[in-house]
Image (cartoon, rainbow, N blue to C red):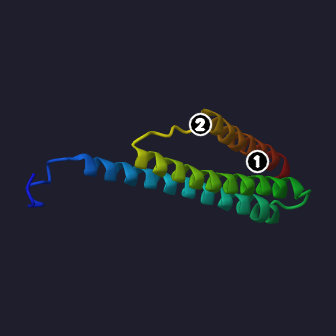
Amino acid sequence: MTNDPQRDVGEPNAVDASRRTSLAAERTWLAWWRTGLGAAAVAVGVGRILPGVAGGGAHWPLRLLGLGYGALAVAVLVIGGVRQNRVAESLRRGAYDQLSSGLVLWLTASAVALALATLAVVAVTI
C-alpha cells in the first residue's frame, strides 16, 4: 500500500471494512429513529387528527389507539438506542450482537395488533 490515495482506491483493508460496518450500524440506528418518529406521527394522526374529522360518535377508541402508537414509538426509540450501544460495543470487541428474535416478535405483534385495531375502529367510526 502506498501513501498515494489515488493508488489505494481499489485496495480494501480492515480499516475500510470496519468503517463500512460502523456506518451500516449507524444507518440502522437512524432507521430505528425513523420508525419511532413515524409511529409518533401515526399516534398524532390517529389520536388527535382522526377524531376531529371522524364526525359523531365516541372518540375514545381513537385516542386510546393514539396512545398505543405513542407507546410503540417510545419503545422503538428506546430499543433502537440500546441496540445501537450494544452493536457499537460488539463492533469494538470484533463480535456480533444478534437482534433478539423475541424482541422482533414482540415489536411485530404490537404493531400488527395496533394496525388491526386501527382498521377495526376506523371501519366502525367513519
Q: Is residue 55 above or below residue 104?
A: below
Q: Residues within 10 Å of mark 2 (few under 14, many from 20)?
A: few
Callout 1 amino acid: Thr
Percent position of residue 26, x then y: 44, 55
Dot label at residue 118? 1
Percent position of residue 113, x then y: 74, 40
Q: Is residue 6 above or below residue 120?
A: below
Q: Are marks 2 and 1 in contact (CB under 8 Å)?
A: no
Task: Say left or right for 112 vs 35.
Answer: right
Residues 88 and 80: in front is 88
Task: Say left or right for 22 vs 78.
Answer: left
Task: Say left or right for 51 vs 19.
Answer: right
Residue at 70% across, 37% down: 109
Which of the two marks, 2 or 1, is nearer to us in this view?
2
Residue at 78% across, 60% down: 47
Percent position of residue 107, x then y: 66, 42
Label 2 or label 1, whichever comes before in sequence order: 2
Residue at 79% across, 49% down: 122
Q: Quadrant of residue 38?
A: bottom right
Percent position of residue 82, x then y: 59, 52
User: Residue at label 2?
Assistant: 100
Residues 54 and 38: in front is 38
Q: Quadrant of residue 77?
A: bottom right
Q: Secondary structure at mark 1?
A: helix
Residue at 62% across, 38% down: 104
Callout 2 amino acid: Ser
Dot label at residue 101? none
Q: How many marks?
A: 2
